[in-house]
Image (cartoon, coloured by chain):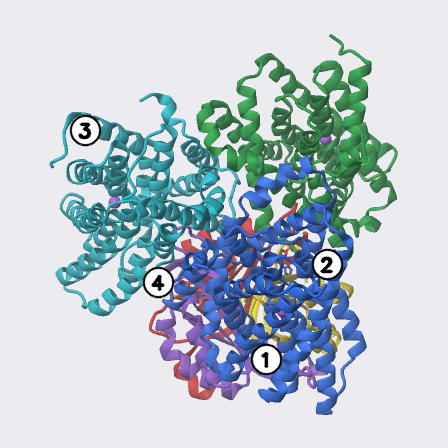
Chain colours: A purple, B red, C yellow, D cyan, E blue, F green
Amino acid sequence: MVLLSEVLISMKRIEFVINEEALQDLIRLLRNMDVRGYTIIKKAGGFGSTGERNPEDYALEQKNAVVILACEESLAEKVILTIHPKLREFGGMCLVTDCKWTVGPAVSY
Amino acid sequence: MVLLSEVLISMKRIEFVINEEALQDLIRLLRNMDVRGYTIIKKAGGFGSTGERNPEDYALEQKNAVVILACEESLAEKVILTIHPKLREFGGMCLVTDCKWTVGPAVSY
Amino acid sequence: MVLLSEVLISMKRIEFVINEEALQDLIRLLRNMDVRGYTIIKKAGGFGSTGERNPEDYALEQKNAVVILACEESLAEKVILTIHPKLREFGGMCLVTDCKWTVGPAVSY
Amino acid sequence: MSLSSLLVPAILFFALGMFACLIKSDLKFPPDMHKMIVIYLLIGIGLHGGKELAAANMGDALSAVYAAFAFGIILPIVAYIILRAIGKIDPLNAAAISAHYGSVSAGTYMTAVAFLAGIGVTYEAYPVIMLAIMESPAIMIGLVLAGYSRRVLGGESKDQKGMMKHLLIDAFTNGSILLLFGSMAIGWVISEPSYKKIEPFFELIFMGALCIFLCDMGMEAGKRISEFKSVGIFLVTFGIVMPLIGAAFGITVGHFMLGYSVGGITLVTVLAASCSYIAVPPAMRLAVPEANPSFYLTLSLGVTFPFNIVVGIPMYYAAAQYLHETYYPWW
Amino acid sequence: MSLSSLLVPAILFFALGMFACLIKSDLKFPPDMHKMIVIYLLIGIGLHGGKELAAANMGDALSAVYAAFAFGIILPIVAYIILRAIGKIDPLNAAAISAHYGSVSAGTYMTAVAFLAGIGVTYEAYPVIMLAIMESPAIMIGLVLAGYSRRVLGGESKDQKGMMKHLLIDAFTNGSILLLFGSMAIGWVISEPSYKKIEPFFELIFMGALCIFLCDMGMEAGKRISEFKSVGIFLVTFGIVMPLIGAAFGITVGHFMLGYSVGGITLVTVLAASCSYIAVPPAMRLAVPEANPSFYLTLSLGVTFPFNIVVGIPMYYAAAQYLHETYYPWW
Amino acid sequence: MSLSSLLVPAILFFALGMFACLIKSDLKFPPDMHKMIVIYLLIGIGLHGGKELAAANMGDALSAVYAAFAFGIILPIVAYIILRAIGKIDPLNAAAISAHYGSVSAGTYMTAVAFLAGIGVTYEAYPVIMLAIMESPAIMIGLVLAGYSRRVLGGESKDQKGMMKHLLIDAFTNGSILLLFGSMAIGWVISEPSYKKIEPFFELIFMGALCIFLCDMGMEAGKRISEFKSVGIFLVTFGIVMPLIGAAFGITVGHFMLGYSVGGITLVTVLAASCSYIAVPPAMRLAVPEANPSFYLTLSLGVTFPFNIVVGIPMYYAAAQYLHETYYPWW
Ligand SMILES: Nc1ncnc2c1ncn2[C@@H]1O[C@H](COP(=O)(O)O)[C@@H](O)[C@H]1O
Ligand SMILES: Nc1ncnc2c1ncn2[C@@H]1O[C@H](COP(=O)(O)O)[C@@H](O)[C@H]1O
Ligand SMILES: Nc1ncnc2c1ncn2[C@@H]1O[C@H](COP(=O)(O)O)[C@@H](O)[C@H]1O
Ligand code: NA
Ligand code: NA
Ligand code: NA
């Protein structure tokens, strides 16, 4: 990716999987930290320490929301330190990966 | 991310994209390997060696399922070696990335 | 992952989040570049430089599509250089990550 | 009662759904379709009930409310004792399961209504209030039983008070209950000509829509049957015996205490015999996360619901008829 | 007019929806259900209108078309002037909000139809053409106002022509408008026996389906109420005053210029007083991306719609009745 | 037959859907809505057919079953020969396409029923059995043809037997077929009063719901038209000629061998002329993955379906009428 060094900037990609019912709380926290962009995928299913979550189960619909967030390292640290103690309450997990952001006309990280 | 070394643990992030009809089989395999957490996104579309899959096509609904799985390297190796020969049957692909798991109260990896 | 060196090949994972209305245009561009595989998740929500997009808002339904694409570095460069100037028009973002592709019977990268 | 009374279309569609599941058909109704029909059916039953109640006696309505509370409180306790004493089920699972049996299943109630309509039997307006009320008290008793179980187990005591408040609020703001109460209130206040305007939608096509609902429920029940093994023989038996115990309570109260007609007694019996799968499962998941959902869901949807639909309703009706002809009410 | 005329089931269900939202109930209708009912209602209203129009006078229909265009052009300009001059709202938000008030709400129209049906009042066939036509012109005026605002602000001038063409095409290919026009055309051409075959679906059960639609709209409106604070007192007031201004235009045109019956005047008034939430919001999001959607959505769905449903319709009807009895039309 | 017989609402709604697609309208029905209406229509047609069959002659029903099998076997072979001999289509695509033409389209059948109802023509109960049966045999023949093609091509021979068994099971557990057979059985066994209770839902509003279904199908067909170019002129022509060949078989069998009335002959002709888009496409995707789905889908949904709806049905009816008046059945 040598050729692309001008187009790509190093960033962190944070991926939350939380109980969909806690989504509003997570978003509020993120917005308060001046996060400028995120993507939400709802109605995800899964399995974890609290058992299975099936968004299509007839009598016990349980949904996860996947939130993807690309941001600079400094903001990423802030985000992780803030959300980390809340993870249990949100019923979920959080992964962090290195990534490159493709520079575009709009800055939303 | 120096500051966060206590909060983040190195792990592998495995991402499967398979035919939704094979999802039960994949999950069964994962559960048998004592995987303790995964996330499922259904009704994905895509394109690959077997052509297009469109979950909204009226007469030929074909759906992919995306399964995301974070686990320790040792388990990741086991998972990949087990699933690898089955990929054709599942009609899909499997990507592996390095990632950091944010330590929380519950361990589901 | 030493053991797996024969099963895993280094690749790039490109992740687009764009306005769902621009999805056809993006796909056409990708197909023209001989991309041989991608995965699409529709009806995603999000927040960015153009404000909030909520796929479930009653009067103002705005949807994102997430497109995931694994390919070799050379193709990845081509893809990024081609899409990069179009990102504003597509109303979205593009992340690039290193990943490993699990070798399977079918090659779709 | 002849065999043809079993050939109520709604019940046949239930059987069709179970059959589809049995032969592993790819038949699948969109999940939203199910939600939509449930919304429609609840409003329909509420409106109809409300209109009838407008012409009814308040004192009698109050008796029905009392009876609903009594069922919601007594039945879970009976269930808990059986599960603990005979089945040796662990306390928290016992608490979660019990709560379901103090509550009701609107689907069973509507099937019973279709059954009575099919054989031309009339019924009182009060049972619909009981239907609306009974979902909630059992949830509270479930929480109380779980709290008691936790103390017995000596584990960390949860914030029982906070949870109780939370569940109480949930129970009163629960969508299904609100829809039922709300449309009951609307059916109550609107004038006859107003009702006539919406009657074709909410009454005329009701029985047909119920068929589609029950076909879907049949598939749902069919799916759960495969989990019988993991649930064990005791619990499966319990899922058939407990509705019979509930029915015994119900028929007694319906005939001797409330003094209803055969149709009314049947509905009260069905309410007491049925077991929730709408409001109680999510409440128990929240209040008793230690309990295994596949236990209470399999029992409720896979055992008790089909038992009541296929065997229970005609049986309760026959019993009600016998009782009505043989004994006088207590007053 | 007695209080009981307010007890139209459709309006009560709207209130139930708002109540559910107020008490934070988890009641939620599947989003697709809403879309389906809207499709159904639009086709129903179109078919019915088309059938009536087949028997109507073309000259009179043309007058209705003129009136629709006049509303679509004049009302947004009035709204813009008020928002700018009195409210000091920034030009682009003012333009986006204005466009909504030149357009119409099919939901409000249908509730008015239910209201008139509830009290047994007949009405002309022409207002339904106005309903189909009015959505579009206001969008264009909105764009013109936005272009004007941008020039005033001295900002980069957007490709106004291209956008105009784009929006014109969008307006004519808009799904809801197409459905309305299309089913109007179908209702027009089909024979009476053909119509009879589909009447049970599109007319008989219409009023009941409308109840479910309005219950959902009530929840939607209720959600928006929580955003009143962020919208500010001026705009909330505007959301109540502007429909009254529109209504004044509407009632004048309906009585004095179109010479309709009380029912017809009421419908014209409702059209002028109502405010779009179907075709205009996405058009304004595209054409005036600088404007804040939460302003126009809150006004349209959270203020004007509920105001019209609960207070407006009966008031407009009373006014129409008074006017009709007191003054002659101009010709 | 006058032009007005073409103005069947259902067909006009189909045209409206195609028009919406043509002008690139953003009109879109929720995918689940389509599934729900299909479920509803299949049950409705099944119940109605079952009730009629209860009063029918078993010998005649058996003849219909034989005819259905004959169509399902002969028509795909004819189609395959034409595609291979005249069109030089590669063997595997030819096999996959052929299978579709041996099967049926429930949507076309229901439109024909609406057409006959619109002009007041009665018909026999047997064609509905043929509808339920014909989906399956063609799938098997498709597989046999594909196996034959593969041997001709000398490629790796697939597990033909395993696939055959798999497809057979799929064909019998296919949701749509099960729903049709199941509701036919239910319509058969239930009593007249029971049927009356669900009739308003399944019959009274059937024709209106069919309109919405066909509007959606019109959009679906319109979408496929853009793919005509990639399919080529030969295949598009085939998509019009093949239903005519099927129709010739159908009308012959319907009149001379089954001896039905004009209405019955029309329905049998429609069955033979129509082409599956429900059970066959997924089966062929599985059994003949080498074939290009856009070929068979475009032909089925983009060419043959609209041809049958707009031109075919009235034509087949006219032909049936002519034949019925001119010749006697063979016996
Ligand atoms: N920093 C980010 N992280 C994750 N997703 C983003 C980010 N920025 C933008 N997006 C996504 O891209 C969409 C379009 O962004 P924009 O064009 O900047 O409004 C948003 O709705 C988000 O879903
Ligand atoms: N190791 C994991 N990998 C992927 N997803 C996970 C993992 N652990 C938990 N999750 C997701 O996080 C949700 C909540 O986890 P938990 O709170 O542990 O039950 C689960 O339903 C999964 O969707
Ligand atoms: N290179 C790729 N990048 C992203 N997704 C892929 C890729 N190749 C295949 N897929 C996904 O895997 C599914 C099955 O692939 P295949 O079995 O090769 O047809 C496709 O429908 C895609 O969703
Ligand atoms: Na009970
Ligand atoms: Na207006
Ligand atoms: Na055919």
Name the amino acid, label 1: Asn
What x and y, as percent, mark residue E293? 58, 76
Q: Which residue is mark 2?
A: F25
Disc 2 to disc 4, C-alpha distance: 46 Å
Q: Quadrant of the C terminus of chain F?
A: top right
Which disc number belongs to residue E101?
Answer: none
Mark 2 belongs to which subunit? F
Q: CA distance from mark 1 to mark 2?
A: 26 Å
Disc 3: CA contacts within 10 A as few (<14), some (14-19) or many (>=20)? some
The numbered mark at residue A50 is 4
Q: Which residue is mark 1?
A: E292
Determine the secondary structure under disc 3. helix
Q: CA distance from mark 4 to mark 3?
A: 49 Å
Please give the residue where the numbered disc 3 appears in the rendered image.
Answer: D323
- Quarter of image, res D155: bottom left
Task: Residue type at mark 3: give it.
Answer: Leu
How far from the left and from the top, in percent, is residue F60? 62, 14
Name the secondary structure under disc 4.
Answer: loop
